[in-house]
């Protein structure tokens, strides 16, 4: 991987490669809508902001294009792909398929899963108290990802990560400025954990399915 730098810059030991920094920086801006759908980002703009050459910028943007977040336009830059109604429906359908299947598989390791979910619930509670939407969404995503990883299928876990990247971008507007929604989402997750503790497999699966469906309904309502 090319880690070339612009003249006069010095790489600090232990920092990520330049292309990784570009990828993480631009991805964060796309997901939190600092860079909204339809924005045209130039390689020079990113290179100047991060103090790197254009080669790692191009590499980082190519990774984001592979994830469907930007589209490279020759000699112009990278267009942040707008969220379409069809993408919303596709992501919601795929999430339900992945998460309900994973919930069923994860039941076999429920005792361990309860302990792994607890730190994410605590983080969600802190975010509800502080009113920090992005922190809540990050903790919410981590909670769901634990369930999917507990299913023991790394391919499925990778698919889920991609789906949540897309929905996190959609969900910024869904949860922003709506404390009742974050409180409801937290209550849903608390109920799921209680079902695991109670040994109620049917309730656990039903709660996971209903949570994903309700999140989808709220997202559709915001975008309507």
Image (cartoon, grey):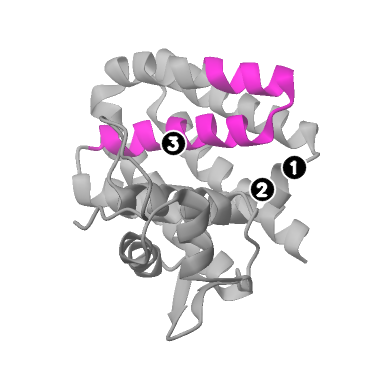
- Mark positioned earlier in the residue sequence (3 or 1): 3
In the rendered view of the protein, which quadrant contains the C terminus?
A: bottom right
Q: Nearer the viewer, mark 2 or mark 3?
A: 2
Magenta-tinted stretch: 122-151
Q: 143 and 69: which one is in front?
A: 69
* Residues under numbered marks 1 and 2 in contact, where contact means CB atoms less than 8 Å apart: yes
Predominant SS along the magenta part: helix
Q: Position of residue 131 (x, y in %)?
A: 74, 26
Q: Nearer the viewer, mark 3 or mark 1?
A: 1
- Mark 1 Cα-neighbour bin, 10 Å: few <14, some 14–19, many ≥20: some
Kindly identify which residue carries mark 1.
176
Q: Is residue 50 left or right of residue 213?
A: left
Kindly identify which residue carries mark 2.
172
Q: How many marks?
A: 3
Kindly identify which residue carries mark 3.
144
**What element does badge 2 sit on?**
helix
Position of 166 relative to 114 (above/below): below
Q: 136 and 214: which one is in front?
A: 136
**What element does badge 1 sit on?**
loop
- Mark 3 Cα-neighbour bin, 10 Å: few <14, some 14–19, many ≥20: many
Q: 54 and 65: which one is in front?
A: 54
Q: Which residue shows up at 27% across the image and 55% down it?
A: 4
């Amino acid at each position: 991987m090319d880690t070339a730098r612009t003249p006069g810059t010095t790489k600090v030991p232990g920092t990520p490669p330049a292309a990784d920094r570009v990828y993480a920086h631009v991805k964060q801006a796309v997901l939190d809508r600092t860079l909204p759908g339809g924005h045209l980002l130039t390689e020079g703009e990113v290179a100047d902001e991060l103090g790197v050459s254009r080669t790692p910028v191009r590499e980082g943007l190519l990774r984001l294009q592979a994830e469907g977040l930007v589209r490279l336009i020759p000699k112009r830059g990278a267009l942040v792909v707008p969220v379409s109604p069809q993408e919303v429906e596709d992501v919601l359908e795929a999430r339900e398929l992945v998460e309900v299947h994973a919930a069923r598989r994860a039941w076999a390791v429920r005792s361990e899963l309860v302990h792994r979910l607890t730190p994410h619930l605590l983080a969600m509670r802190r975010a509800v108290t502080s009113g920090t939407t992005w922190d809540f969404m990050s903790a919410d995503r981590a909670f769901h990802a634990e369930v999917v990883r507990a299913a023991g299928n790394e391919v499925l876990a990778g698919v889920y990560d991609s789906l949540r990247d897309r929905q996190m971008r959609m969900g910024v507007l869904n949860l922003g400025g709506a404390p009742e929604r974050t409180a409801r989402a937290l209550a849903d997750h608390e109920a799921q954990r209680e079902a695991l503790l109670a040994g109620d497999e049917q309730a656990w699966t039903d709660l996971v399915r209903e949570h994903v469906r309700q999140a989808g309904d709220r997202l559709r309502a915001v975008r309507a």
